[in-house]
Image: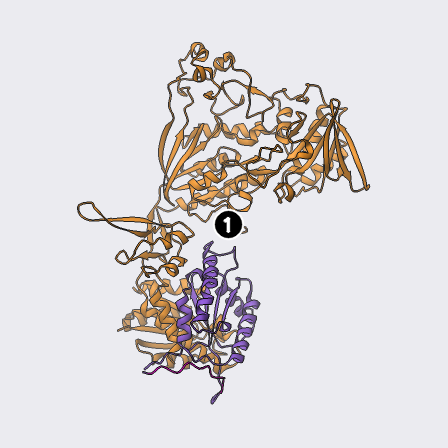
Chain colours: A purple, B orange
Amino acid sequence: MTQETKTVEQAAPEKHWEPKIIAFVCNWCTYAGADLAGTSRIVHEPNIRIIKLPCSGRIDVSFIIKAFEQGADGVIVSGCHPGDCHYTAGNYHARRRFAGFRDLLEFCGFDMRRVTFSWVSAAEGKKWADLVNEVVEKIKELGSFTEYQKFLT
Amino acid sequence: MARIGVFVCHCGENIARMVDCAKVAEETDKLPGVVVSVDYKYVCSDPGQNMIKDAIREHKLDGVVVAACSPHMHEPTFRAAVATAGLNPYLCEMANVREHCSWVHTDRELATEKAIDLVRVMVEKVKKNQELFPIRVPITKRALVIGGGIAGIQAALDIAAGGHEVILVEREPSIGGNMARLSETFPTLDCSQCILTPRMVEVARDPRITLYTYAEVEEVDGFVGNFKVKIRQKAKSVIAELCNGCGDCWRKCPQKKIPSEFDAGLGYRTAIYVPFPQAVPNTPVIDRATCLKFLKDRCGVCAKVCTRNAIDYTMQDEIIEVEVGAIVVATGYDLYGIGKDQPNERWKGYGEYNYDAYPDVISGIQFERLLSASGPTQGAVRRPSDGKEPKSVVFISCVGSRDPEKGLEYCSKICCMYIAKHAMLYKHKVHDGKPYIFYMDIRAGGKNYEEFVRRAVEEDGVLYIRGRVSKIYKDGDQLVVVGADTLSNSQVQVRADLVVLATAMVPHRDAYAVAQKVGIACGWEGFYSEAHPKLRPVETTTAGVYLAGACQAPKDIPEAVAQASAAASKVQLLFSSDELEREPIIASVNEATCVHCRNCIRVCPYTAITDKEIRDKKGNLVKIVAEVNKGLCMGCGTCVAVCPSKSIQLAGFNDEQVFAEITALGSK
């Protein structure tokens, strides 16, 4: 098992490359917002894979790191709007944690343009769809993120 | 080795139109650990569910993944189904390939690819799932109501009528609260005491209600269904069982000039006193701070005249311990004072009205006491300064309310109504009197409220001046009220014999202290926080604690009563089963690795985590670790994310499970 050299490659598709976006969302707001986008049939890019958590406060920084390790090109973290957390305060912890870890992640070499932090409520189906489309487009411009690819045997 | 069954639903055309379900089932079948993988038209239907149950038995499945709609839709359906087949319901997960996939994408190939990914994520997660069992917590079916105003009384009566015991604790010597101080209530002009006192008597008579007056809640421990409360019964110095309410004691008491709290300082009471004639219970109490016996060891007249030997100067405060399953907080409100002495820095008082220095500038509640037949003037409207009947009264609205400069931005909701009421009642009593109201807006949004205000204008000739008052000053023995009349664009000055201020409704003075004891939050402007501003107005985020009345936000009597009944129904809901069953999605601590950094304890929004001492067989303290209260934890997982040693995990969403989900997306 060898480590790949740490260079960013531009998206040079042999086959047409599609970015992979992993989203860590809270069950009560953003997941429900994404459901609403579904029931409203709001079309958006298919590159996104949602991982459901009870609360944005549950989101550990290691999830973001692991997502990139596993080949994600972009990560979305999303929860309830401040003041609306189903568990009253979890999203404040998420926000504070993210603010605290941003710089550290950047220092470690993660391109923070690839991480998007957002608040999407259960009523904001359109906002979710727009967010997904924006992020996918942004990641398409940035290209594939190869630095932290984990080599699996 | 895992034995997972995967069931891919077509949902008619909803999924099948955009996702190749057969292919999803086929690809998923190749995953290690998946022993059966099929697609079917409607998995949630009876035959669909039977298919799952049969598969569990036939293939001895230890995990099920249903690829279909959102778990918000059918997770309970499928979990119930697998449970009947003998599989723990928490070993069943759903992959959302409808709302998150088939309904929002237009490329069939990419949608199918995504669906395969989503199913694989849940398969890998389910492999790490553990059997979970609902947590059962016993419930003590007794309620505590804190506060004996109209809201507390209503809640107590409702809960008792529902067949449960209630303990009602009131800090004043009598129940009744602020409503007992009112003369008549809007919009009916019902006599307040007349409609309230029957309820008060009912509370005293109901065998299921235990009433503690002149008592306060000292300490609250425990959690929903299992609260342990200490109540401090302050020493009344009167033995209630012996007292027959004759009144000889307070009639003979030499201390006659103590400002009466009930009369808002406009009248007097004695040191041994009953706050008002209709008090429930009718037992007097001795205010030891003003009683000569306690101050100087003199007098003792009340004990001498009491024919029942009911006076006991040696009585001490008593701590009563009770166990309850639910608490209703109904501690009511206070009024904004315009003086210099304020409880916090934000509130400024009204220097432009000379603070509280003018005796003839009074508050709304003081005017109620003047109007009240059992008040300090027996219902005659009199100036506090010289006892004369005022011929011109100015009422000023929004004193404190809607005034960010004085510290309160909000509207107190009831003042427009009671100001109209005051003006009308004044006019009914003083036929040649002139009432003026300075107002900003008129907020009369209830049943018959607008009609009531119109009545004040049309029938009683109340003069409404739209503008604020900038100054009140004394001229001779009258007051001059200087204000604006914005509708005629001029300044006006009104010579008034009496000025009544509609001061803001504020949280009662000990709101924060009570909140801390009970474990609830003071939110907006110091009022107690409800669990959700729209959909959960009587619950708090602390399970088992409910709110009723003005302690939650300014409101009128009908709203307070409605909220109290709502809180009572929540209590009955809680008491409707013998055990409280909770979802087992809660955190738990690995005591071997916990180092007691207390990060989790600090961040838990529900204060569900506490210290636990680990002792050896001899009782020596080995270490202290964190412990999660199964009755309180709501399963947010914030604690898990802050634990530096990863000693706390959340069932259903532990690190192993989440990492498995992320890795599943990488293993292509």
- In the rendered structure, does residue A8 fall within the stretch colored magenta? yes
Q: In this view, does A113 lie to the left or right of A71?
A: right
Q: Observer-nearest residue: B481 or B302? A: B481
Q: Give the range drawn in magenta.
A: A2-12
Chain to which mark 1 belongs: B
Q: Which of A19 and B633 is in front in this view?
A: A19
Q: Quadrant of residue B268?
A: top right
Quadrant containing the C terminus of chain B in the rendered view: bottom left
Does the stretch in magenta take in B201?
A: no
Vertical order, B82 against B382 (above or below): below
Q: Position of residue B24 (x, y in %)?
A: 41, 79
Q: Which of the pair B432/B401 is nearer the observer?
A: B401
Q: Is residue B387 above or below residue B106?
A: above
Which residue was labeled with disc 1? Answer: B536
Q: In this view, does B382 lie above or below A49?
A: above
Q: Number of marks in the image?
A: 1
Query: For the point 53% across and 43% down, which residue is it?
Result: B526
Dot 1: element: loop
